[in-house]
Amino acid sequence: MINQTNHLQLLLPEGFDEQSLFEMPLKGWLQASVAVDDGTCYPVYFCDPMRLQQDLEQSAENGEPWVAEPGLIILPEVTLEAAQKAVYFLWAKGYFASLRANHDATTVTMNASAMHHNLSAFAHEQTYVDLAR
């Protein structure tokens, strides 16, 4: 059951660093997870409309004219701030209740303020963004 008061964290891919942060809007996608304080973890895939179109065209060329990703969230531009806002808003709206949860969330190893100041120091660890409001 989704509780509106749960503590949320956006888990970023292993090796996510300052370069990854810079490249995010250029690439137009981010695959991550949303972790809840009870250990539940939801996969999410953020992409912008251009990346979605490219993915659809590539899939169609391969005989699969569709795009389906667990937790697909379309953003006008894929930035960390936009992803954070989307997760918080969608959590409040109950979006994650429709996703299949994974109950073995990776242990997080840094806090959100550290991420904004020195991402490269954590390039080989699981990185997260604290979504507490």
Image: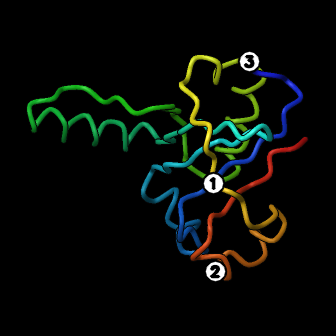
Q: Name the residue under label 1.
A: 106
Q: How would you rate the neighbour count of disc 2 (Cα within 10 Å): few for under 14, some for 14-19, many for 20 or more?
A: some
Amino acid type, label 3: Met
Percent of width and height locating residue 15 = 53, 71
Which of pointers 3 and 2 lies earlier in the amino acid sequence? 3
Q: Nearer the viewer, residue 128 or 82?
A: 128
Report the Cα–Cα distance between label 2 and label 1: 19 Å
| Residue 44, x across and y down, in percent | 54, 39
> Which residue shows up at 61% across the image and 74% down it?
18
Amino acid marked by disc 1? Thr
Does dot 3 land on a helix, a strand or a loop? Answer: loop
Quarter of the image for residue 4 reads: top right
Label 2 with label 1: CB-CB less than 8 Å: no
Q: In this view, does 118 lie to the left or right of 23?
A: right
**Mark closer to the chain start, 2 or 1:** 1
Q: In which quarter of the image is residue 87?
A: top right
Residue type beneath disc 2: Ser
Residue at the disc numbered 2: 120
The correct choice, above or below, for 43 with respect to 11 in the image is: above
Vertical relation: 27 (above or below) 40 = below
Pick the front one: 21 or 50? 21
